Image: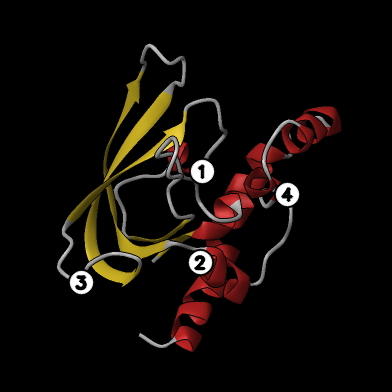
């Protein structure tokens, strides 16, 4: 799939899905948004910065079309509470083998994520490359990395 087609899908998805998530985010105070930015890595800062569709794709390590199969809270002895998301992969676009049918990704449990409010519909997912140290990842630009198809 060409990059221009992906950008078109991003733009359409952002228009349809972002308004719902932005309405939920508007309930947070400016102070809490600032704490998220100052207490997080540069990746988390992208949650508050508007990215172009090309920037979302370029920053992504994993891009695929599919659906959320399940999510599970995981608590371990290292005190890193995670959520394990299992996805059914329909089409691999970047960072996955073409024949990948399922993937499990982990996200820090305390991160507010649009993945917590999606249904089992078809989406295009754009994730950062999982961390080599923790295995954690997140959507590029928060809701900007999630596009309902």
Q: Are marks 1 and 3 in contact (CB under 8 Å)?
A: no
Q: Residue at x 56, y 32 (%)?
A: 111
What residue did someone put label 4 on? 48
User: Which residue does the image show at 78% across and 28% down from the upper left?
Assistant: 32
Tell me which corner region of the image, top left, top right, bottom left or bottom right, holds residue 148: bottom left
Marks 1 and 2, how far apart at CA: 13 Å
Quadrant of residue 124 within the rendered picture: bottom left
Q: Earlier in the sequence, mark 1 or mark 2?
A: 2
Disc 1 to disc 4, how far (Cα)? Answer: 13 Å
Q: For the residue labelled by badge 2, is the local secondary structure a helix, a strand or a loop?
A: helix
Q: Which residue is mark 3?
A: 98
Task: Give the residue displayed 82% in from the left and 34% down from the top.
Answer: 34
In front of the other: label 1 or label 3?
3
Task: Using the numbered discs, state the Cα–Cα distance from disc 1 to disc 3 in whole angstroms.
Answer: 26 Å
Tell me the residue that label 1 is attached to: 114
First of labels 1, 3 by sequence position: 3
Task: Judge whether 101 appears above or below 54 on screen.
Answer: above
Residue at the far right: name it.
31
Dot 3 lies on which element? loop
Please name which of the two marks, 4 or 2, marks the residue nearer to the observer.
4
Q: How many marks?
A: 4
**Residue 36: % across, % down:** 72, 33
| Mark 4 or 3, closer to the camera | 3
Q: Which residue is mark 2?
A: 13
Outermost residue on the front side: it is 133
Task: Examine the rendered structure and indicate whether residue 99 appears above or below residue 27.
Answer: below
Residue mark closest to the camera, 3 vs 2: 3
Q: Is residue 136 left or right of residue 92?
A: right
């Amino acid at each position: 799939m060409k990059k221009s087609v992906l950008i078109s899908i991003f733009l359409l998805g952002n228009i349809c899905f972002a308004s719902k998530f932005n309405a939920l985010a508007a309930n947070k105070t400016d102070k809490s948004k600032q704490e998220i930015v100052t207490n997080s890595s540069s990746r988390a800062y992208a949650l508050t910065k508007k990215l172009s569709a090309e920037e979302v794709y370029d920053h992504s390590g994993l891009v695929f079309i599919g659906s959320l199969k399940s999510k599970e809270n995981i608590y371990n002895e290292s005190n890193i509470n995670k959520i394990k998301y299992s996805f059914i992969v329909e089409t691999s676009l970047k960072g996955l083998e073409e024949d990948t049918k399922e993937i499990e990704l982990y996200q820090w449990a305390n991160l507010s994520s649009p993945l917590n409010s999606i249904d089992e519909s078809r989406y295009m997912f754009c994730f950062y490359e999982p961390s080599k140290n923790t295995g954690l990842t997140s959507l590029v630009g928060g809701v900007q990395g999630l596009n309902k198809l």
